[in-house]
Image (cartoon, rainbow, N blue to C red):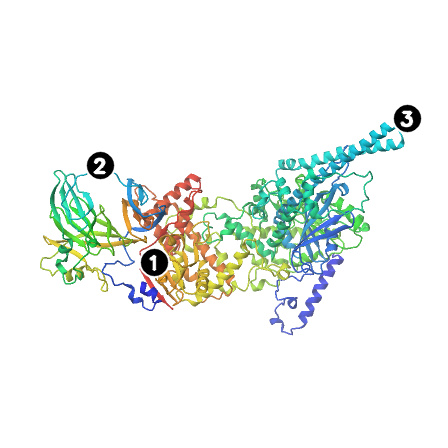
Amino acid sequence: MLRWLIGGGREPQGLAEKSSVQTIGEEQVQNPYTELLVLKGHQDIVRFLVQIDDCRLIASSDKSEGWSILEVKRLVDHQDNILSLISVNDLTFVTGSHVGELIVWDALDWTKQTSECSFWDSSVQPDAQTEIRLFQSPNETSVRHLASDEENVYAAVGKGIYVYNLQMKRVIACQRNAHDSSVLHIEMLPNRQLISCSEDGSVRIWELREKQQMPAEPVPTGFFNMWGFGRANKQANQTKKVQENARIHFLELVGDLIGHSSAVQMFLYFSELGLVTCSADHLIILWKDGERESRLRSLTLFQKLAQNGDL
Amino acid sequence: MISAPDVVAFTREEELGDELYREPPLPEEYSVPLFPFAGHGANPWAKVSSSKFSRDFILISEFSEQVGPQPLLTIPDDAKVPGSFDLNYFSLRIMSVDYQASFVGHPPGCAYPKLNFVEDSKVVLGDSKEGAFAYVHHLTLYDLEARGFVRPFCMAYISADEHKIMQQFQELSAEFSKASECLKTGNRKAFASELEKKLKDLDYTRTVLHNETEIQKKANDKGYYTTQAIEKANELASVEKSIIEHQDLLKQIRSYPYRKLKESDFHAYEPEGTLDQAGTSSEQDLATSDPAEPGEMHLYSRLPSYTPKLIKAKPAKCFDKKLKTLEELCDIYFFNQTLDQLHHIERTFRGDVCYLLTNQISRALLKQQSVTNFLFEDVSFLEEKAPENQYRGCQGLSQDAADRKCSEESPAPKVVISLGSYKSSVECVPIKMEQDMGDPQEPSMTESITFEHQENLDYLDADLKGSISSGESIEVLGTEKSASGLMKSESQASLPISPSPQVGRSKVGSRRTVSEDSIEVLSTCPSESLIPEDFKASYPSAINEEPYVDDEEGGLRFTPRLNPDNADEQEDVSNQENLAQIDSACCIGKESPSFLEPLPGLGQKQCDEDGVVRIPPQPYRQAEQGLHGSLVGSPPCDGAPGGLLPHELDSRCPTAGREVSRTSLDECSDSTSYISSAASTCSDRTPSPAHPVCLTNERHKKKAGQNALRFIRQYPFAHPAIYSLLSGRTLVVLGEDEAIVKKLVTALSIFVPNCGAYAKPVKHWVTSPLHVVDFQKWKLIGLQRTVSPAGVGVLHALSRYSRYVSILDADSKTLRCPLYKGTVVARLADHRTQIKRGSTYYMHVQSVLTQLCSKAFLFTFCHHLHLPISEREPEESVVNRRMNFLKLHLGLANEDVKIVQYLAELLKLQYIQEPGQGANPLLRFDYVPSFLYKI
């Protein structure tokens, strides 16, 4: 695309850029967000959003004051700054640190239940040959954000997304290069979709899928062919699959939202009302389902018609 | 019996015709009836006009008490405009029909002089010999030094086209009333200050006289008064009387505005915002603060600084003093305002009457479509004030329609002409200019006509007898006086020979005016009481018409002519003609629900075979409001599937019905259009802006149309590009050369739907990287391509947001955008089109877009397409119904659906938008793949 633009259209074939990041084309059937509304109120980076109720939120930008902390207890098991924290349930919480450690804590006695500290190592296993960079900077391994549901903890580690199963105590699926840049926020939706936003300014929608796999089947290529995953010219085979009882989990990209011109700091999900993203470009964007909005507008229209007595 | 002038007219025409017919020695079967005057000008529709002026102009004249009628100024102020046209002579004529029957001075039984606040009179005059027709607006200004304190003036709009004057009567009247009101407001102010000055003088004089008397009294000890003393005392008494009189006058002039405001139809002069910013402040402020005022005016307004003069007992002789000029008579500020207004009038009514009418009609129709008109129409006209259009001439095609309309319409509170509607009807009143002719003919007139115009006749006689002695003709084609309310009963007498004179009067008819010795009054009068039966029964004797060669055409052709001598003979003819006229009117009503439907049968003899439309468009008649309301619940929407076929639906499209398909066809759209038989076609070549603000728009349209035409011919991928615009996908025109990019943007801008009643979402030239906000705001963007690093940034941003945009690369002539397989755009932008002119193509585009709009309107406002019919109906079935409607009923194919859906979305947004807040700029998009098009 860019090459076509720069080259004045001489080379339209080069539309797909060489990038390690999986891309999805312009055709995104499953992407429900077909309408956006930009809110322009902030003068600085919008870092944080707080949901008030079903349809309201607060945005906090860099110019607002910090947060107050009620209780502090020092836990000294991390090797580096703790960047993320999440409580899974009443008994468990999980922390992630800058160097890529993930520790699951017992909330009652403040003890470490389990920890995972080498995401990059564990993920290299299936295709170590293709891994070019062996030395990764801490930035690419820091656990920036954690999300969880009852069974899994979803970790935004560097550019990738990892799904850590609490019961199996190991990573069951991952996208090592989910984004071009650090993933800043992830959230699991009730419909098994995972939304991630990143410093590269994009928001991506993933779906955690599982598939029974024939145990005898050769692992990578057959899998991709069978699923028709990506096109030939796309370098899309970053899916990490873990075989467990012949079940593999993988994250499939179902859509991406492009609107922000700078790092997307955070987002809030308002179920069918849509998605709100905030970014360092001072903007908040509401992403909505165009079909639904159109229906709602029709409804409003007829209500107004009735009000005006025109009906 | 045909009177002498008629014979003259006919013979002259035949002579000319014969000359030309002699030339081509063609066999009979090949002889095409040539236009007899082909040699005179390229335009066969141009009436050969005997007028000596090249274009319409405005003339201000005064009936000076010293020198008689004299022209003061013309607008445009260019000696070339009147040309050899004798302004002095014409002033004489128009001023001689002055309405001043009013008495100013000492009315009997009144101690003091009374100012008479005379209403302006509005008259249409025709001078057949000069080929000039004029709307004449008489007004009086006050002048302390003038006889009876009044100075009669008139403003006249002079045109060679009688139709124009008659059809634009209301508009002219309204506009000139504004000018007149402005002039009079200034005059009252000046008059009041003049009075105050005079009072000071008088007061001073009284003091001086009083002192002198006292001195004399003291000096006089003889016990009796000397003659000198008595003289002084008399003088003092007369000064005191004069003071009281002037005080009374001052009181009168000051109380004027308040008295007038109580009258419902009074249209107070309010300075318009565009003309003057200062005008919003009070008049008093203006007078004292306006720096533009000359010193003299300051003298008037700064009364405290005025040094009173002693007034001599004997006033100067009437002819010794120099009368004030018009500028002096009214405040200079208001004078300039008036001139502005008159210039505005001149611009507004410039050009052919057909053009004016079509414009007015389309404007009025568009105004009605309040729900959809923002999409593709000019923003400027939407911002126009409504009242102007609210009371457009209501001369409907059919008599009964007009009547219905009149009964529906309650008297408007704020119209200049207090009667909501007018119908032109023709009255023929023989008013003699020559003394010896007045008597034998007048008695033969029908009594009530005489009665009706008694007041006119009175002053006409009084004035004309004195001033005109030649046997020239003058016609009073319309007076407003005759339309005043007190004549309700007499209005029957005003014979509506033709309910719509523009239809009725043919070329020949309008040339009747060669009559040498009569004054004809064609009056516009109220039509409340006019029903067809009325004019059949009453006073047929006053009408007569020239027998028509092609009467069987059923033409609404009337040649109202005053000829009392052969009245009886003509009676039958006129009755027949009336019947025929009513019949055809009814037919028109039935056959063409659209007001715009041309009446081919009524074409004139010479041209109807070419299929040239000869009937000028009718002034627009405001139809019932609540159009959308009634449409929403209308059968086509509620009907079961299959209830409405696409072609049926098409015919229902408000303005995009058969009319469009007929006139927008490529083969004819450039060659013909509505062309009237109006004389101004040839005399007024200047393009006629219907509204001053449109002047630039007009040019823009032409240019845009031309560029668009070039675009669709040059680029084979014009269709997907236009589809992108119509479906709301932003199109970015990328290029290095600013001029080329801007040209393309201008060309494509005519396809961009507006998102609200604001400016078009078009950005002609951007040099910085685009942002998502830009796509929300702009639907068409011209973007600079540079080789610099900054330029790479621009392209990077573009490639990042490529899913929201279609990109037209102007340098390499490529286009990247989604696929289009519909049919609408093919009609809109056919590269094989025969249309050659930009403005024509623009209109073609407008008509297709209007059709789309109507489809979008139907789609948006059909209840069952968006809401479930029953509560249990699942959403999918509603969706199915919606798609069915779009595809089957609206006949939309493939991507066309998306166009209508997008337009519908815009309509929804516009409709549900709360008045206070601006429209939310939404960005709607689809995840569809783009393709690359090359030339």
Give the image quarter of residue B873: top left
Q: Are marks 2 and 1 on the same chain?
A: no
Quadrant for the N terminus of chain B, please. Answer: bottom right
Density class for disc 2 (Cα within 10 Å; few <14, some 14-19, many ≥20) is few
Q: Nearer the viewer, mark 3 or mark 1?
A: 3
Question: In the drawing, what numbered circle is on residue B151?
Answer: none
Disc 2 designates what residue? A70
Q: Are marks 2 and 1 in contact (CB under 8 Å)?
A: no
Q: Which of B470 and B172 lies nearest the eye of the viewer?
A: B172
Q: CA distance from mark 2 to mark 3?
A: 119 Å
Chain that bears disc 3: B
Question: In the drawing, what numbered circle is on residue B797?
Answer: 1
Coordinates of residue B321 in the picture (x, y in percent):
79, 46
Disc 3 designates what residue? B222
Mark 3 vs 1, N-terminal side: 3
Coordinates of residue B350 in the picture (x, y in percent):
61, 56
Coordinates of residue B822 in the picture (x, y in percent):
37, 60
Q: CA distance from mark 3 to mark 1?
A: 112 Å
Chain that bears disc 1: B
